[in-house]
Amino acid sequence: MANYKEIKGFHVQSQSTDPAASSMAAGSWASGGTMNTARKINGGSAGSQTAALGFGGGGPPYIGNTESYDGSSWTEGSDLNNVRRSTAGMGTNTAALAAGGYGGSNSNNVETWNGSSWTETTEINTAREEAGGSGTQTAGLIFGGNPALAVTESWNGSAWTEVSDLNTGRNAVGGTGQTNTAAICATGQVPGSPATTTLTETWNGTSWTERNDTNTSRYYASSMSGSSTEALIAGGATPGSPTANTEWFDGTSWTEINNLGTARDQQGGLKVGGTSTAALSFGGAEPSLSNKTEEFDAVTTPGIIEGQVYYNSSSTNAFKVTQYDVPGGTWASGGALNSGRSQNSGFGTQTAAVSAGGYGASPPSPNYRTLVEEYNGSAWSEVTDIPTATGDMASGGPQTAGFIAGGERPGVNIAETFEYNGASWTEGGDLNTARRDLIGAGTQTAALAALGAIDPPFSAEAETYNGTAWSTVTEANTARRSAAGGGTSTSALAYGGYTGSYVKIAESWDGSAWSETGDLSGDIKATLGGGGPSNSDQLAFGGYGGPPGSARYATTEHFNGSSWTELSDLSGARSNNNSLPSASTTQQLFAGGNTPPASYVTTTEEWTAPLANKTITIS
């Protein structure tokens, strides 16, 4: 007899608990071997979870004690030559380096470990304690430190060289990385109140770049391990008390996962050499001195995947499905445009996007631009310009097969279409009606352009494109400019706009006619961003709706086919932005834009919706 799996191709599992969002989310801390000497402000740490090295620290008194860990127990070895706490550690348990520290005053002393003893070597240029470390015994990096330093130095095995500073000086940082060309610095202590911070920066061998903040503000979070693209931070001090909080960095944002068994700060961890999936935390203050060791291990089984269906047999007794949770999405900082501008048009996806044209302050100052940039998910790079400086165009398609159509040059509305192949631009068929501030949707060979401004009047016109020529189709119900929209040439949505006053009207296109549907619900009205795959799944964000110099919005809304729901706001209010008209509502992009009174920004924000387990309901 055939079973359901054979007929439908998948098996509905019975689960006692919901699957975890990732192997890291399912991971946990477990007790390890006890250190021989309890200590806090561990001097440094290096190695791996089963071959670790901890050295120095304080009570006070400050100690030079060195211990190695084999995955189950600690063994004492030779002491540091210079007794101190708070050094930056690098390398492995048989080839380590200890730089800086504090032994009554800030130190510039550096020592190397060969598996049995310590030897003094070239000093760092800036004496410091509580700095972060990255790299190996012959290719290391030290950054930050007390008092609130931003100084970064790179080590080549024989000499230290000052390189680019951190963007924000701080001490008591969490730091890790496997080389001197890729590191991460997170949290720490900064001047002022509160003294703790959530700041995160990554190092690419040349400069530091600010990333998304941690969820918990702290300092002395010494248990940090991994790399600049995947790191774990645990423990530390929040104002008033130690914390057990643990967070995981996936290269973009921090997610809270299972806590340490014991809240503590000033503990040691695998700052280098370790991985985020097999981390170590030892010593510290509870607030009394601790000799505890905890080991973090990620679960190696796969995490949740989209479309997974299962039956929860424990508390809920419900059928569930794993899907992207658009209402649970949030905005996070992305790489900045190279040139600030507004009225730029975008197409592609969040990890393969294009921003074309627009209006910028300089150069020239101010005017429309020919500038084109491509985004790879982390940084923008300049590519081939569009043939003529233009702004406020319709756009659509993927990064390597996109289009722009219509728009405005100084004092002139245009009808031209340009097609992009990932390397160069080619002129296509002209729109039947030249206009600006119009919406676009679809692809290079099946596109839609609608609404806009003709000066006068406002336009309700709609046209579709077959890759060669534009054809006039049914007009929208309400003529307007400065709306947003997205979807395909047969399933699109237009929303917001300006008719002489700001409107929240939304209209749905089914390939032959426009139908009015649920209005925008929040503050958003015109010159907003938006996009989505169809007329029943759209995001709207940013925008404008008031007198000159005011009333820009950070609002985000989602349309589900009948109504709009407000979601998490952008980090800042702005309008006239670059968005992706046909991208998924689980991954959107907002690049550039305008903030009062006339600031053309380089800011990029990325919208990401997480996977989540949802109960299947029947109605």
Image (spheres, rainbow, N blue to C red):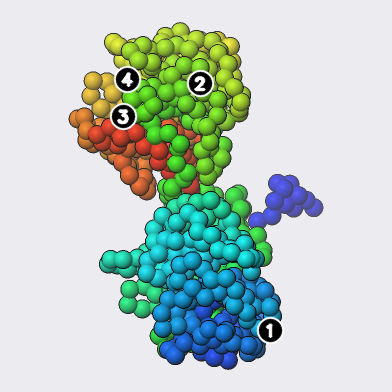
* Image location of residue 417, percent across then percent down: 51, 15
Label 1–label 2 contact, CB within 8 A: no
Which residue is the site of mark 1? 116
Image quadrant assignment for residue 552: top left
What amino acid is at disc 3?
A: Ala
Mark 2 and mark 3 lie on one chain; the one further toward the N terminus is 2
Element assignment for label 3: loop
Label 3–label 4 contact, CB within 8 A: no
Mark 3 and mark 1 lie on one chain; the one further toward the N terminus is 1
* Image location of residue 97, percent across then percent down: 60, 73
Most foreground residue, 475 or 608: 608
* Image location of residue 466, percent across then percent down: 58, 15
What amino acid is at disc 4?
A: Arg
194 vs 218, left or right, is left
What amino acid is at disc 2?
A: Ile
Q: Which mark is residue 526?
A: 3
Q: Which mark is residue 386?
A: 2
Label 4: how many Cα within 10 Å (few below 14, some 14–19, many 20+): many
210 vs 468, left or right, is left
